[in-house]
Amino acid sequence: MPAKSPPKYARFSSADRRSMLIEAGLACLARDGILGFTIDRICVEANISRGLITHHFKSIDGLLAAVYETIYGKMLVVLETPDTATGKPEQRLIAIIETMFSREFFNRESLNIWLALWGEMANNPALLKVHRKQYARYRTDVESAISTIANDRGLKIDTGLVATMLISLVDGLGLEWCIEPKLLSAKVAKDACYKMLEPILGALR
Amino acid sequence: MPAKSPPKYARFSSADRRSMLIEAGLACLARDGILGFTIDRICVEANISRGLITHHFKSIDGLLAAVYETIYGKMLVVLETPDTATGKPEQRLIAIIETMFSREFFNRESLNIWLALWGEMANNPALLKVHRKQYARYRTDVESAISTIANDRGLKIDTGLVATMLISLVDGLGLEWCIEPKLLSAKVAKDACYKMLEPILGALR
DNA sequence: TTCCTTCTTGAACGACCATATAATAAGGTA
DNA sequence: TACCTTATTATATGGTCGTTCAAGAAGGAA
């Protein structure tokens, strides 16, 4: 009696294939920008047949939204890992800045993805919807870190404005570096953030 | 004897049509991002036949490079208009900041174009080449304004770092506002720049 | 087992893409 | 005038796009 023949499709679970498509989408975005984010290229990258993107994500825009949610979520998870090594409120803000400019996030591949997504945000409502949700979390993280320090030190500052300044500077530095890496290093970028914050919040480190 | 029949093509000069294609390209970029920057749409927008983009710009990427050169150039021309109303060195830097956040440049349409172009920079060598040329001018403008003030006030500062910080903050604020205009206004954005610079350079206004 | 749902493939479809090309018109020179 | 170059149009071509669809395979419940 012959052995039971192995399953034909199921080397990966359905959830696995979903993740593989997202990762392949990230790779395509990093390599060729939004113009490279196509069903053909993503399926070749993931080695998965063409029909599956529509099946799992409804449309290519659905996959793009999932991709954005994924990359933003990866960052937020690290950002929200409480740095409990010290009880100092400064530690929280320092951890955020160090994370943003760490090798894991401050690299050409990741920043290419962010740039590509920013450029499509205005033209893609599904993308904007994901952004609003994730940004709210990010914003809360940053703003609460700042206000904790300010309260601790008895400072009367416009927490929202300072958060906007920091977030803008971080994004702007990432943009500059991604386009022309020779202009600055991750260390210079970090120092720029501390340099901007210290006259407002006082020394952090 | 019949009157000479009017020319069939020449309602516009060749140079006019070149400009019209660039303007149409800008409009398409503003409306639909890089995905909307196609020969079909641009020619419909400009009401010019399809073949002419290839003729004048060699390829669609050639037009994109010309479009970037144009929008960057428009900004630099205004930026480099010497504000000679006062001889104070501060006036130069103030003029730069005020220009960047003026209605002419700090608006949804323009910023959509910048975002779309940033997203393609890494994947388009022709675009990067234009960027390097224009950015060098921009950088010189900003850095010389800063160093003039620093010299005038006898300050020992890292001019390059401060320029990087300002340029990054300006870009970052534009990005934030373009994605979510409710978060800040042009006035808040300007104030953020002054707030960042004043601890470094002293009061500017 | 049977039955239904979910998953996966691969092909087919029509729309749109950039570019090439042929034909015609305009501009300029001699 | 004749002639050459540049400008412009319109069409053709071959490729890629996203989506739809039919068919079959896998998983799970009864």
Image (cartoon, coloured by chain):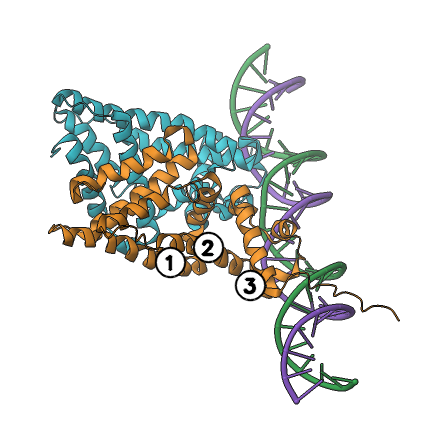
Chain colours: A cyan, B orange, C purple, D green
- Residue beneath disc 3: B57
- For the residues beneath circles 1 and 2, the answer to whether they share a chain is yes
Q: Which circle's residue, 1 or 2, is located before the other in the chain?
A: 2
Name which of mark 3 and mark 1 comes first in the sequence. 3
Q: State left or right for residue A140 relative to residue B126.
A: left
Residue A150 location, x and y as percent? Answer: 17, 24
Q: Are marks 3 and 1 on the same chain?
A: yes
Looking at the image, do the residues carrying marks 1 and 2 touch, with CB atoms under 8 Å apart?
A: yes
Residue at 28%, 57% in the rendered image: B140
Residue identifier under label 1: B134
Q: Quadrant of residue B11?
A: bottom right
Q: Quadrant of the N terminus of chain A?
A: top right
Viewer-nearest residue: B75 or A144: B75
Q: Label 3 is placed on what type of residue?
A: Phe
Residue in the picture at 16% in, 51% down: B150
- Please check whether the numbered discs 3 and 2 fall on a single chain: yes
Can the viewer see residue A88?
yes
Q: Residues within 10 Å of mark 1 (few under 14, many from 20)?
A: some
Please rate how many residues cluster around mark 3, counting C-alpha atoms within 10 Å: few if below 14, some from 14 to 19, many from 20.
Answer: some
Residue B105, percent across and down? 42, 44
Give the mark toward the camera: 3 or 1.
Answer: 1
Which residue has dot 2 on it? B68
Viewer-side residue, A184 vs C12 = A184
Question: Against B53, is B94 above or below?
Answer: above
Q: The residue under label 2 is which amino acid type?
A: Tyr
- Secondary structure, mark 2, is helix
Q: Residue furthest front?
A: B85
